[in-house]
Image (spheres, grey):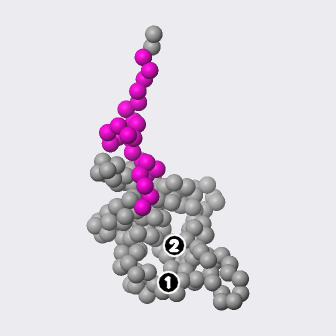
Amino acid sequence: MSVPRISNNHPTEGGCGVTVKDVPAQDFIVAYAAHLKRTGKIEVPKWADLVKTAKFKELAPYDPDWYYVRAASIARRVYLRGNVGVGAMRKIYGGRQRRGTIKEKFALSGGSIPRHIFGQLEAMKILEKSGDGKGGRRITETGQRDLDSIAGQIKAGQ
């Protein structure tokens, strides 16, 4: 009679094998944004305090660390989906544009913010351009290791 094999890689047992998918999105994004700010490798552009994130927004973000939060969110999106480009990010962060008495419609967000963040994350070796000819970005091995280590710290703290 064979004994059922128990995996040591189960996320609920200990801290090994924890990925970004195993932790809540909000907890991960806040922790990774704090990590990005603490390391100081991401350079916030000087226009970040003046810019709106989309044409349908009325004001710039209130949070002074919004750029790090958006970078963490973009890194998580690329981790989960892969082969994501600026156009897909514009659609993800898009929303409802109110036009007064005219019927509202969906509007894309701005493209310069994800484009700038992609460049910053590529310089940190978190992302790389996809080599399949279709464009977009994907997560590197070091980027995946970095994001999974942050997820493991979150899971261990819970």
**x, y percentage for residue 63?**
38, 78
Vertical order, 24 against 61 (above or below): above
Q: Give the range drawn in magenta.
A: 3-26
**x, y percentage for residue 87?**
61, 69
Say which element carries label 2: helix
Q: Is residue 82 visible?
A: yes
Q: Which amino acid does label 1 sit on?
A: Lys
Residue at image position (47%, 74%) is 116
Return the residue at label 1: 52
Q: Is residue 149 visible?
A: no
Q: Which image quarter is the N terminus in?
A: top left
Q: For the residues marked 2 and 1, what is the alpha-carbon distance in whole angstroms? A: 15 Å
Residue at image position (51%, 72%) is 114
In the image, is 102 to the left or to the right of 116? right
Say which element carries label 1: loop
Q: Which of marks 2 and 1 is in front?
A: 1
Which badge, 2 or 1, comes first in the chain's sequence?
1
Vertical order, 8 against 67 (above or below): above
Q: Which mark is residue 11?
A: none
Q: Residue 115 carries which label?
A: 2
Q: Which amino acid does label 2 sit on?
A: Arg
**x, y percentage for residue 74?**
48, 65
Residue at image position (44%, 70%) is 70
